[in-house]
Amino acid sequence: METSIFSESCNTEKYLEKIETRGATCDTFRTKMYGKLVFVKRLKEKYISDIRYREALKKEFEVGFRMEHPNLPRYISFNGNEILLEYIDGETLTERIKNNPEYFTRKENSDKFISQLLSAVKYMHRNQILHLDIKPDNILITRINNDVKLIDLGFCYTDCYTDTTGHTKQFCSPEQLKGNSIDERSDIYSIGRIIELLPNKHLYRKIITRCTAKDKDERYKKVEDISLPKNRRWKFALIAVFVSAILIIVLMAQHNREQEEPARHIATEIKKQSSRPIIQEVRDSQYQEKAKPLKAETKKKPTPSLKEMLEQDEEYKRNIARAYESGRLYRQKMEEDFEKFKPKLNEYLKDIIDFVNNDKFLKEHPSYLEYNAKYKELWREALNRMSYDEWTYKYYKSLDNPFSTFKSDLVDSIERKFQSNANKLP
């Protein structure tokens, strides 16, 4: 394909600005075309004469050129050994987590990231394309509006291009590693591995578990089947309202019983009197005099006065105040326990924190497998020691705040540091 725009704008070396990436087969550059920044992906010198790499680059352009989606880059032109694409001003997922780890601690940000990634993959699947190389370095997040861009179709699979031998071991599915048949569920596995890298991955445990199942029959069948968990704050608010309503009903019922007790006593006395045999001889004046006050007491109770109603309202308010005070004391007790829990947990996880933060262990365990094995061994030892401390282990397993939030943040920070170290190892 020959175009004057490409030859005049992109092949002029003085306009090219090299961009450092981790590409194994291509160099990347930034240049300008009519004052607009564009991206150049060019085969490295040693691969230009290899027909396999030229065909792979051609495949990437032909597949990408016919796609139009806000979360995929636009392909502009192809010139034998280089592609011209839309320039995306952003950073990879790896860089975003490293440079701004707090970004993904907000659920709305992680929900937006996952939703846009799912949207891009769903669009590709509907167009009969499998990406097969979804990894952090192939996901860009724009600096403006933090939108997702899924890049690099070099290893994709389509009806026209079925030869796809490339993959990234850490993120590809088991069937892809073994060379077995692949389908949409292979990309879904990689999506699960991506979500697993997020700092607040504990919010998406069910999705991660199902996406990354070794047996692909246990995974989601389609990307459309993946639904993000909804915000659960309204559930806690609803539970609080429900508990408060139950407490008010119980207090009101108790108050009514106390008010009705004298009336029940009078009714019982009347029943006892009426159950006695009526003897003509006892109908004297003395009996009549005794019966008069009893009958007077059984008359319908008059409507309470304003003063009585105000007194009842004050009693109700006092009961509510006692309930709130009880809740306040419970929260105070939980906060005191939390202050004890933090140093205890840090003490139990001290060996693991030292392990991931000390570079000397990278030299002692120079391979990913050795480093990972030692890391898991330290976790087993920590949990085993903790299980003998009934108080700490109870709160470690607890889902109640603030224990859960502190524990999750600490564990996630350790996990991120471990992953960062492990990625450096062969």
Image: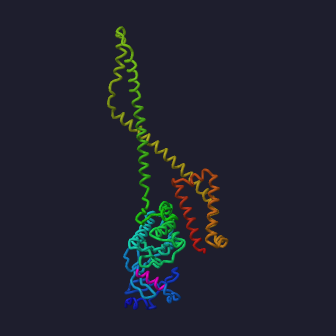
Question: Count the marks: how many?
Answer: 0
In this orientation, does residue 152 appear? no
Q: Is residue 363 left or right of residue 192?
A: right
Q: What range of the chain is rendered magenta?
A: 53-62
Residue 313 shown in magenta: no
- In the image, 139 versus 170, the foreground residue is 170
97 up-or-down from 314: above or below = below
- In the image, 348 versus 212, the foreground residue is 212
Residue at the top extreme of this rendering:
281
Q: Residue at x 54, y 63 (%)?
A: 412
In this orientation, does residue 255 appear? yes
Q: Quadrant of the N terminus?
A: bottom left
Residue 106 location (% of width, % of height): 46, 64
373 up-or-down from 166: above or below = above
The chosen color scheme is: rainbow
Q: Residue at x 37, y 37 (%)?
A: 310
Residue 369 location (% of width, % of height): 62, 70
191 up-or-down from 328: above or below = below
284 up-or-down from 246: above or below = above
Residue 382 location, quadrant: bottom right
Residue 327 location (% of width, % of height): 48, 46
Residue 105 location (% of width, % of height): 48, 64
Residue at the right extreme of this rendering:
364
Q: Residue at x 44, y 52 (%)?
A: 236
- Is most of the magenta stretch helix, strand or loop? helix
Q: Is residue 173 left or right of residue 1?
A: right
